[in-house]
């Protein structure tokens, strides 16, 4: 997680400062990651992991939020996605790293608040070196600029984490994009 206290009046300077801090921290993180050698899975581990990944997500783990036009959007909470990844890959069998963080905008709005939009490219690496990457987006609006940045970065990182994990298999959230599965979830909840 990146924490920055930005105390400048100029939004362009703030964005440049954040980009520099992120770049220097990513370089350090990449150096650390390259020192850890991949550990291959046994054939039994591979079969067990694949078996878990092919299962559908427990319907009780599917949450909903309001979407555009009175639609309901299905999602899995970040803590649940992390817990499932720990169960499937082991607590020390996977890692995540922010590869890129981009400040998309910083706006001062009436009322003295600051709006911030951030996108993140995140990589999840398994113990055998297999990895997936995906993007996430987050926004924050607070009176303090640092609070807006913190909320936006956390939201973007969690979004990227969930999007990246889903690329490994159904149980990690990929099934949420299957309309038939969502219909089954809805039918089960009506019972």
Image (cartoon, rainbow, N blue to C red):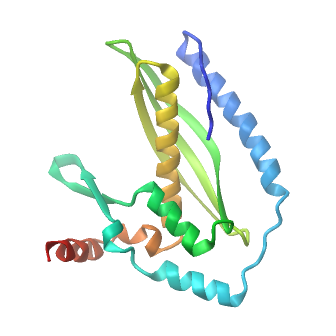
Residue 92 or residue 8, whichever sits in front: 92
Q: Position of residue 99 (x, y in %)?
A: 65, 47
- State whether residue 167 appears in this view: no
Residue at x-position 23% and y-position 77%? 184
- State whether residue 103 appears in this view: yes
The N terminus lies in which quarter of the figure? Answer: top right
Residue 49 or residue 106, whichever sits in front: 49
Residue at x-position 64% and y-position 30%? 19
Q: Position of residue 129 (x, y in %)?
A: 73, 68
Residue 121 or residue 170, whichever sits in front: 170
Number of labelled discs?
A: 0
Horizontal arrangement in the rendering, residue 176 relative to residue 157 (left or right): left
The C terminus lies in which quarter of the figure? Answer: bottom left
Residue at x-position 42% and y-position 31%? 140
- State which quadrant residue 10 falls in: top right
- In the rendered image of this protein, does residue 122 appear above or below residue 189? above
Q: Position of residue 93 (x, y in %)?
A: 67, 69
Q: Position of residue 31 (x, y in %)?
A: 82, 48
- In the rendered image of this protein, does residue 8 appear above or below residue 151? above
């Amino acid at each position: 997680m990146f924490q920055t206290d930005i105390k400048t009046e100029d939004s362009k300077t703030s964005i440049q400062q954040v980009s520099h801090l992120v770049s220097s921290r990513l370089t350090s993180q990449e150096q650390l990651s390259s020192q850890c050698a991949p550990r291959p899975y046994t054939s039994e581990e591979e079969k067990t992991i694949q078996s878990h990944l092919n299962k559908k997500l427990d319907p009780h783990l599917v949450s909903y939020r309001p979407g555009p036009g009175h639609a309901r959007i299905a999602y899995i909470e970040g803590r649940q996605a992390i817990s499932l990844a720990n169960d499937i890959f082991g607590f020390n069998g996977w890692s995540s790293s922010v590869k890129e963080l981009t400040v998309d905008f910083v706006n001062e709005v009436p009322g003295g608040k600051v709006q911030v939009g951030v996108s993140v490219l995140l990589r999840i690496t398994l113990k055998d070196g297999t990895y997936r990457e995906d993007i996430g987006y987050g926004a924050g609006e607070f009176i303090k600029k640092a609070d807006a940045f913190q909320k936006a970065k956390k939201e973007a990182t969690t979004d990227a984490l969930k999007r990246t994990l889903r690329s490994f298999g159904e149980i990690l959230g990929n099934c949420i994009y299957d309309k038939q599965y969502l219909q089954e979830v809805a039918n089960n909840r009506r019972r």
